[in-house]
Image: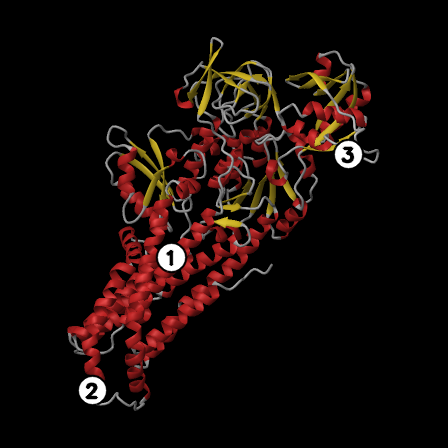
């Protein structure tokens, strides 16, 4: 270890601070980063050419927006193009996966408000992410922008209701008169009342009314579909919206032309069915995604908005943004440190797990650095504000937003199919015109033939199958406590090659528990009374374990008779390394072995050996002493979650590499290293190092990250797929692609199972989406295609799609 102040870590780019770990050629901020660099075998040149690390992601002229309404790659391209055309914008990067966009701009030419207005086009809704605080953006928009979200859903609902209403109005005469008339002509039936041209005359009089009704469905009900097609055309990226809109407009235009020519082969019914059904599917998808959003509750925040300014013995509450470098702030026991700084007066004990991921509290002395977002669990702290006066949480948040904005979504399989089909369809339509002209038919026939080609050959069912598949898969996930917003999640899970697990709070419970204690029973009860007055994770665990009387067999009993002894605590005092006090004339000391040495208390060799053994196992030893001598050791650990070993083994059976990543030191990871299916363990890794580790693991393979803490958020955003557990912080949930509502590791395996069956359902629905074309193309080739056959094919295809979408594909 050597003193260092200016260089950045070779691995993660983080400033090395006062102490660095050096090799012959490079400097690192921790031994964990050095070990990871060696294990991943990356060179400095490769790192220099890589994407910017989390510590580099700071740009005073960058703004991050959340954009509601993005649902495909086409939306990304459309918004990026809109932004780049704006004066003063130098770069734009959008991601529909996170519904976010990052803009780099010249503040002399434009401002965030202007940019937000510029992006609020074609139905997109924009919110400045910096104004939503540190909680989940989806949660924030759901609450503060909830009215707009509900308005959008209500509007979709109104459009759908209008489509159904006008559709029923049209379908009644169709079913009573038009369909029987067409079937009688097709099958050669003689139906009473259908002879002599009376029906034809009546229908010709009704069809102008039908055209008016259909126009409402096309230009009001189907407006969201037309908007998607417009975006697709603007970006020259065909998608399923364009297929649906093409079918809708083709059937409508064909019917209008047929009406003007006095023909009866009009498809107003098909036009209404296509528009209403696709909008209904989109409405169902929207409602399902909103339900998924509602399942995410507000989680613990890691940022404070106020600080206590400490000046010449006086205190004053102030807003964090008003703090200046070298200001001194007072942070009391149990309070969160608002900004980074240096401890002026101490010592104190700090829980830094939200930032570093280390599960055990850390003792800080005067001159030590404190990170914003950590919690003072024991003692109080006077802190000198760092320059600049920001929090480590702020930098983590900015890193998450940057990584999310550059993570472009996958093009959906149906959209890829649309891109291949449309050029072929256009070519056949042109050929139909050419054939009509070559055979001497007029322009009217040529137009009708070309429209008929599109009406028969357009796979518009994909515009119906895609939202139904998305909604069905999301609904199935919600039913199992798994929240997803992006339908490509399941595709990315199926492609996973390596899963990276955070340790603290993910593979472990994230809270301290007592695993053993060899002190006398009466001393343990006294210790519990002392620790009841302290405020740190170890104290809570000891109080929970020994706050009741204990039998010789080790089981706990609550005293119930009047003879139960009442313990009286006096002279209670907290120290940076433990607590002390007097109980019924006996003096007790509880804490770190160094506290015993400082106060001159005796540490027997057997106690020292127990301490070393516990530390070697990655546990926290707490020494119990009475009247000047240590009398035993309480051992606390952050225990692994139930079923963790079996879950890792089952992932390994899927030929997936399993890696454990943690901010804790090497000793805390020995338990996981012993698991045969854990390929590698990286310990002592800071948040920036976690992000870099995941990025390097993505070289040539697909990486999934599972975590729960704010310190995991940048790595969750960097990964090809991020999964956060139910105990996760808001920033972790916002960075992840999947949020497991229950605080249970079993949800991770269930997510992989869902991905497998979701892929099968998507393939089935894609095939069913083409059923319409399979039925009507032969009918057209044999010259028997009529509106009733086309409508029957559309209804059959849509009905089978709906049934398959609601079918449970993953058994309990």
Residue found farthest to the front: 562
Q: Which mark is on residue 560?
A: 3
Is residue 434 something that shows in the picture?
Answer: no
Residue 170, position as x, y percentages in the image: 28, 71
On-image quarter of the N terminus = top right
Q: Which mark is on residue 283?
A: 1
Q: Is residue 419 above or below residue 187?
A: above
Residue 779, position as x, y percentages in the image: 34, 79
Task: Judge by depth and name the residue closer to the eye, 490 or 201.
Answer: 201
Instruction: Find residue 407 and report its image quarter.
Output: top left
Please identify, in this view, whether the residue under mark 3 or under mark 1 is nearer the observer. Answer: 3
**Which SS class for mark 2?**
loop
Residue found farthest to the right: 552
Q: Residue at x 48, y 34 (%)?
A: 46
| For residue 193, side relative to residue 521 (left or right) | left
| For residue 613, side relative to residue 312 (left or right) | right
Q: Is residue 522 above or below residue 460?
A: above
The residue carrying mark 2 is: 197
Q: Which mark is on residue 798?
A: none
Q: Report if the CB atoms under discs 3 and 1 are less than 8 Å apart.
A: no
Task: Judge by depth and name the residue closer to the eye, 171 or 76.
Answer: 171
| For residue 232, side relative to residue 481 (left or right) | left
Q: Residues within 10 Å of mark 2 (few under 14, many from 20)?
A: few
Q: Residue at x 35, y 43 (%)?
A: 67
Q: Give the mark nearest the N terminus, 2 or 3.
A: 2
């Amino acid at each position: 270890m050597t003193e260092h102040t200016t260089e950045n870590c070779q691995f993660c780019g983080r400033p090395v601070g006062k102490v660095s770990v050096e090799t012959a050629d490079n400097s690192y901020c921790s031994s964990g980063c050095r070990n990871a660099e060696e294990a991943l075998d990356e060179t400095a040149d490769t790192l220099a050419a890589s994407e910017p690390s989390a510590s580099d992601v700071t740009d005073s002229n960058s703004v991050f927006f959340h954009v509601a309404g993005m649902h495909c790659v086409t939306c990304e391209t459309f918004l990026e193009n809109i932004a780049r055309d704006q004066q003063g914008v130098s770069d734009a990067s959008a991601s529909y996966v996170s519904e976010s966009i990052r803009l780099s701009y010249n503040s002399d030419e434009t401002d965030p408000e202007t940019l937000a207005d510029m992006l609020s086009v074609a139905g997109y809704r924009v919110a400045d992410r910096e104004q939503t605080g540190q909680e989940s953006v989806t949660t924030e928009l759901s609450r503060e922008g909830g009215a707009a979200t509900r308005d959008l859903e209500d509007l979709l609902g109104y459009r759908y209701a209008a489509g159904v209403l006008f559709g029923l109005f049209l379908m009644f005469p169709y079913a009573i008169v038009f369909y029987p008339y067409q079937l009688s002509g097709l099958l050669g039936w003689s139906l009473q009342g259908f002879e002599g041209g009376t029906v034809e005359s009546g229908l010709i009089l009704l069809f102008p009314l039908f055209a008016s009704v259909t126009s409402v469905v096309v230009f009001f009900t189907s407006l969201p579909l037309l908007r998607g097609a417009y975006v697709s055309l603007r970006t020259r990226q065909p998608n399923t919206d364009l297929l649906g809109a093409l079918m809708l407009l083709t059937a409508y235009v064909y019917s209008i032309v047929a009406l003007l020519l006095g023909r009866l082969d009009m498809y107003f019914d098909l036009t209404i069915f296509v528009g209403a059904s696709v909008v209904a599917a989109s409405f169902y998808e929207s409602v399902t995604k909103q339900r998924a959003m509602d399942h995410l509750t507000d989680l613990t925040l890691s940022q404070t908005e106020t600080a206590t300014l400490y000046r010449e013995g006086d205190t004053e509450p102030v807003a964090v943004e008003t703090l200046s470098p070298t200001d001194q702030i007072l942070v009391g026991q149990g309070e969160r440190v608002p900004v980074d700084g240096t401890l002026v007066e101490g010592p104190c004990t700090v829980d830094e797990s939200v930032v570093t991921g280390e599960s055990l509290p850390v003792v800080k002395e005067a001159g030590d650095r404190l990170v914003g977002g950590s919690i003072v669990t024991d003692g109080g702290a006077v802190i000198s504000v760092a320059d600049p006066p920001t929090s480590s949480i702020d930098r983590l948040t900015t890193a998450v937003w940057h990584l999310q904005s550059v993570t472009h979504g996958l093009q959906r399989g149906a959209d890829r199919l649309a891109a291949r089909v449309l050029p072929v369809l256009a070519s056949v339509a042109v050929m139909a015109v050419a054939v009509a002209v070559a055979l001497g038919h007029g322009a009217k026939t040529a137009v009708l033939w070309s429209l008929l080609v599109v009406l028969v050959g357009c796979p518009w069912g994909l515009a119906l199958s895609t939202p139904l598949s998305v909604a069905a898969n999301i609904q199935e996930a919600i039913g199992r406590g798994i929240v997803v917003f992006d339908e490509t999640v399941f595709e990315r899970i199926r492609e996973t090659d390596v899963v990276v697990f955070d340790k603290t709070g993910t593979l472990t419970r994230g809270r301290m528990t007592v695993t053993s204690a060899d002190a006398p029973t009466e001393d343990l009860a006294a210790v519990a009374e002392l620790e009841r007055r302290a405020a740190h994770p170890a104290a809570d665990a000891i109080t929970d374990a020994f706050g009741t009387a204990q039998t010789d067999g080790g089981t706990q009993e609550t005293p119930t008779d009047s003879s139960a002894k009442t313990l009286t605590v006096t002279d209670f005092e907290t120290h940076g390394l433990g607590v002390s006090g007097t109980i019924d004339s006996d003096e007790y000391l509880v804490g770190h072995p160094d506290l015993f040495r400082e106060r001159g208390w005796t540490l027997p060799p057997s106690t020292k050996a127990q301490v070393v053994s516990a530390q070697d196992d990655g546990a926290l030893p707490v020494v119990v002493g009475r009247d000047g001598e240590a009398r035993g050791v309480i051992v606390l650990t952050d225990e692994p979650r139930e079923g963790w070993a079996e879950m890792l083994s089952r992932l390994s059976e899927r030929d997936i590499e399993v890696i454990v990543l943690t901010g804790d030191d090497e000793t805390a990871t020995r338990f996981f290293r012993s698991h045969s299916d854990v390929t590698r363990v990286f310990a002592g890794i800071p948040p920036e190092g976690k992000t870099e580790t995941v990025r390097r693991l993505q070289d040539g393979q697909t990486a999934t990250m599972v975590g729960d803490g704010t310190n995991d958020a940048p790595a969750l955003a960097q990964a090809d797929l991020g999964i956060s557990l139910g105990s996760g912080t808001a920033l972790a949930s916002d960075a992840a692609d999947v949020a497991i509502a229950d605080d249970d590791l079993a949800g991770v395996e269930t997510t992989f199972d869902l991905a497998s069956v979701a892929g099968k359902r998507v393939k089935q629905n894609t095939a069913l989406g083409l059923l319409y074309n399979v039925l009507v193309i032969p009918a057209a080739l044999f010259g028997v295609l009529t509106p009733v056959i086309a409508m029957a094919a559309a209804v059959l295809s849509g009905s089978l799609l709906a049934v398959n979408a609601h079918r449970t594909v993953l058994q309990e």
